[in-house]
Amino acid sequence: MAHAVTPSFEQALNTYEPVLGLETHIELGTASKMFCPCPTAFGAEPNTQVCPVCLAFPGSLPVVNEKAVEGAIRLGLALDCSIAPWGRFARKNYFYPDMPKNYQISQYDEPICVDGHLDVTVDTPEGPRVFRVEIERVHMEEDTGKSSHVGGSTGRIHGASHSNVDYNRAGIPLLEIVTKPITGTGELAPLVARAYAAELRDLVRSLGISDVRMEEGSMRCDVNVSINERGADEWGTRSETKNVNSLRSVERAVRSEIERQAGVLDAGERVVQETRHFQEHLGRSTSGRSKEEAQDYRYFPDPDLVPVAPSEAWIEELRATLPELPAAQRARVTAEWNLSDTELRDLVNADAIGLVEATVTEGAPSAEARKLWLNELSRRATEQEVELSSLPITPAQVARVIALVAEGTLTNKLARQVVEGVLAGEGEPDAVVESRGLKVVSDDGALGAAVDEAIANNADAADKVRGARWPPPVPWWAPS
Ligand code: ADP
Ligand code: MG
Ligand code: ZN
């Protein structure tokens, strides 16, 4: 058997075309869990946010969290899905130590939302290109607990002496959003996958149903990739890379998987249907469990729960709560602020549209607001490795700094020092101007007194200036 040699991404794309599918889990920010009243706050002492229901004590009964259903429906509406008028929860049976029930309550063949779509924009050398990603379903389920492995050097189960399990997370509501197969992206596949994850994150954030922090695990992507020879009638066998935890990793997971599968097919071998794990430090995935024999989860409707049957009226009520969605917001600010494609992209990449808009609402011109957030403040956020919105400065304070420049109290250079003062916790912009003595002096009397004082204190220098020949002699090379 020929040995698989991994070709470059470009080589792979000469022969094959990729098909993608993304399954994204989002942890809802509800106050209580999916089926019990336990709190969901992050970071509590292990096993303090548990009760007989989420620990699956015999005889305990789950009750559906209305707020979680509301979140699912609002996301479904924002994705232009149909909302099922009736649907049951199902038990997905499997054993895992961090899952006390030995089954997960999920939705199987009766998901709450189906058939939606999300448009994503990708930058290409020819300008922005829009791809429509079809959404297969959005369904509700519950999270598992968390195991930690103790005694080994790596924190992994291998080499550990024992494991601890924390059930605080068990039963936290999750939404799973599953795309239909995404075709026709060619070499843009990694960027489309990344743009989809970013767009979905922004959409969910705008709905306020989750904090969608990939690095903290409240949004996790499973990335399915297959490739087939260009023009083939059938798609290839897919692999599924689990729990990819950053936008950059989504992009890299797709790219490296296309390359790997191309190497396998080039060598005349076949791609195995399997679960893979993305290794952040390697920039690619490694093989996990084979899915060749599909696991039998013995799904069946959960007899302990009543069906979810949202009324037309309730769905319409929820539709009315939808905010302006990110795509509409981008279109609007592009027109209002007269932005070029590049200017819009910079704002999107810096995650600054909302901040700039809030600064404009506080009275700043959009151009100045954009400049401050994108240059000075973005630089500081990057330096401190925090998100722009986490900087300790408010849009109102930024607007005040801009106003102080506009009225001539500050130069741009002094404005930067005021921003620095605000970020350092020295108070409001006006207080920083006062305490640091940063005002531009434009009053003639005060200026004259300062000049006189400077001359008196520097008599030598002043004499030299007085004695200097002025105008200086004309140099020989000067044009006549
Ligand atoms: P599972 O339950 O085993 O994860 P699903 O049917 O839910 O399987 O599909 C998982 C994801 O994979 C979906 O997003 C789907 O669109 C996508 N998908 C299905 N077939 C392919 C394929 N040949 N190549 C890439 N992605 C695929
Ligand atoms: Mg899956
Ligand atoms: Zn509980």
Image: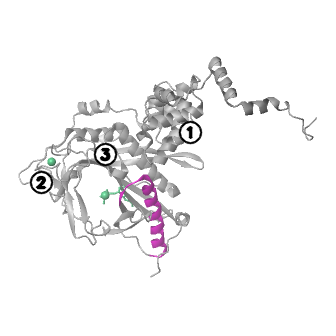
* Magenta highlight on residue 263: yes
Quadrant of picture, ligand 2 = bottom left
Q: CA distance from mark 3 to mark 1?
A: 35 Å
Q: Nearer the viewer, mark 2 or mark 3?
A: 2
The magenta stretch is 242-268
Q: Residue 289 is drawn in which quadrant?
A: bottom left
Q: Amino acid at mark 2?
A: Ala
Question: How would you rate the neighbour count of disc 1 (Cα within 10 Å): few for under 14, some for 14-19, many for 20 or more?
Answer: some
Looking at the image, is mark 1 or mark 2 earlier in the sequence? 2
* Magenta highlight on residue 115: no
Which is more toward the observer, 63 or 425? 425
Give the image location of residue 318, x and y in percent.
28, 33
Which is more toward the observer, 359 or 434? 434
Give the farthest residue toward the left: 59
Q: Which residue is mark 3?
A: 114
Q: Is residue 165 left or right of residue 261?
A: left
Residue 56: which numbered mark, if any? 2
Q: Quadrant of the C terminus?
A: top right
Q: Nearer the viewer, mark 3 or mark 1?
A: 1
